[in-house]
Amino acid sequence: MAVAAQAAVLNSPPQAAVNAAAAVNPIRYWKEASGGAYTNGSWSGGASITLAVASHAGNTTADAALLRQIRYTIIGGNEPCANGGYPAQHELHVTGMFAIVKKTPRIWDQLTAAEKGRIDLIMKATFIGCAFTTSNNNPYLSSQRTLDGDSNLGRDWNPNYREGMLGGVLVGMTYFGGPTAGEAILNGYNHAEFVAQINAAGLTNIHKTFNSRAAGVAAAPTGTEIQNAVRNYKYYNSGLADYSGIYNALVTNTYGANVNPGLNNGVGKADSTGKLGGMLVSGASTLPNPGAAGMLLEFASSDGNGPRSSLLYAYDGYRPHQTNQLVLIIGGLWQKGSAVANNAVARMKVGNADLAYKIGKGYVDYAKGKSINQTDLVKNSFGSAYVMPLWTDVLLPYHNSVTPPPDPDPTLDTDGDGTPDVIAIRVQCGI
């Protein structure tokens, strides 16, 4: 029997995390930003999610900074570029925020109809972009490209790609109200009409992306190709009605390794200079849960230069996955107690504890054929002070709580005596 999805009551992140998030400058997006992520927040992103979760939980100290980020994001030239590729992982910092805020009446009701309309356009753009790049109907699956013609992507690439691209589908679907509403958006997509709408709204980043082919970018898909790709959407065997299947594909991959202390059982691998990487700095002998399923895949993955074991890349899978799960929970689509949810929670308990342990003990990355210790970078520059409490203080307590049984069916009459069971029980108990 299917387990019903339920809206959740979540804790606020601790005040220190909220204060740290509120002190971060607003994240901005534009295509010319260095590094290929189309943003200034590829390192520090995530503050907006912490603020949104805090406000949703009733912590009003987050409200002013949250509203500042919302209104900054909807200014043309600041909004996500929505190409559906590598930058999607970073766009979750605001698309996830919008999905959470829409379920937070105290914040949502402070926005004007015009502001909400701009958010709708941004969310539709990121939803379409990610649906295009992950759809079975994409005509470029054998050699993928984004809406603006970029070829640096693959729907089955490492977690930092998958979590953003498929996460963009899950978050967009949730924002618009669930699978049925999401399918209506995708199946009714009219490229020419949408390009005209975003142009009229002055959303210049999105317009540049969606107008790429018309502007002469030969590698960009045509409007017809985009329409055909997103209609009747499926990612392998899962359409939006099976969003839990899409989510399960994400969590099983992102948390898809068994706990170990590093490459070659913690001995590490030497790069061309002889420096060892892919290993703990200390604490290998006391590593918790050795051999358990759920370690973040990027501690045991590969790239174009061979094996990869990276704290930095592991964090880049953990952070967007956490946002995707928070949105499903707050959006009322998380099926607590289901096989998918139980699998996810079991893996995340193992993997997130392992991540925290390796940050604490120090980890030397091995990635792209080079060894480098980036522990301090992850600790101090990647927002861990406000991102990681979303697990320890918000999600973990939620997952550990007991879900109450659903309210009884007020019409159920098991013995057929004409008196509903719920009334009969009250009579018998004198209540």
Image: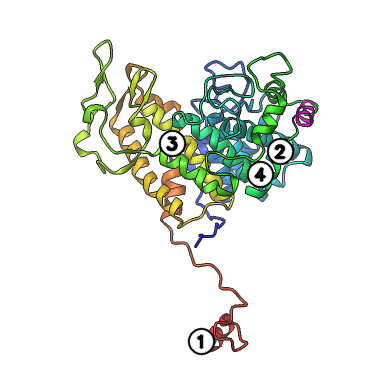
| Foreground tag (3 vs 4) | 4
| SS assignment at label 3 | helix
Q: Residue at x 51, y 60 (%)?
A: 2
Q: Hey, which residue is sitting farthest top in the picture?
A: 273
Q: CA distance from mark 4 to mark 2?
A: 12 Å
Please tell me the numbered disc located at residue 14: none
Instruction: Identify the mark nearer the N-term, 1 or 4.
Output: 4
Q: Where the C terminus falls, by quadrant?
A: bottom right
Give the image location of residue 73, x and y in percent: 66, 30
| SS assignment at label 1 | helix
| Foreground tag (1 vs 3) | 3
Amino acid type of disc 2? Answer: Asp
Amino acid type of disc 1? Answer: Cys
Mark 4 surroundings within 10 Å by alpha-carbon count, few (fewer than 14), some (14 through 19), many (20 or more): many
Mark 1 surroundings within 10 Å by alpha-carbon count, few (fewer than 14), some (14 through 19), many (20 or more): few
Please tell me the numbered disc located at residue 429: 1
Give the image location of residue 106, x and y in percent: 67, 49
Amino acid type of disc 4? Answer: Gly
- The answer to whether marks 3 and 4 mark residues whose Cβ atoms lie closer than 8 Å is no
Mark 3 surroundings within 10 Å by alpha-carbon count, few (fewer than 14), some (14 through 19), many (20 or more): many
- The answer to whether marks 4 and 2 mark residues whose Cβ atoms lie closer than 8 Å is no
Instruction: Identify the mark nearer the N-term, 4 or 2.
Output: 2
| Foreground tag (4 vs 2) | 4
Where, by quadrant of the figure, is residue 169 drawn? Answer: top right
Segment colored magenta: 191-199
Q: Where does label 2 land, which residue? A: 120
Q: Where does label 3 land, which residue? A: 318
Query: Residue 72 versus residue 273: which sits nearer the camera?
Result: 273
Q: Where does label 4 land, which residue? A: 182
Q: CA distance from mark 1 to mark 4?
A: 46 Å
- In this rendering, does residue 346 appear at all? yes
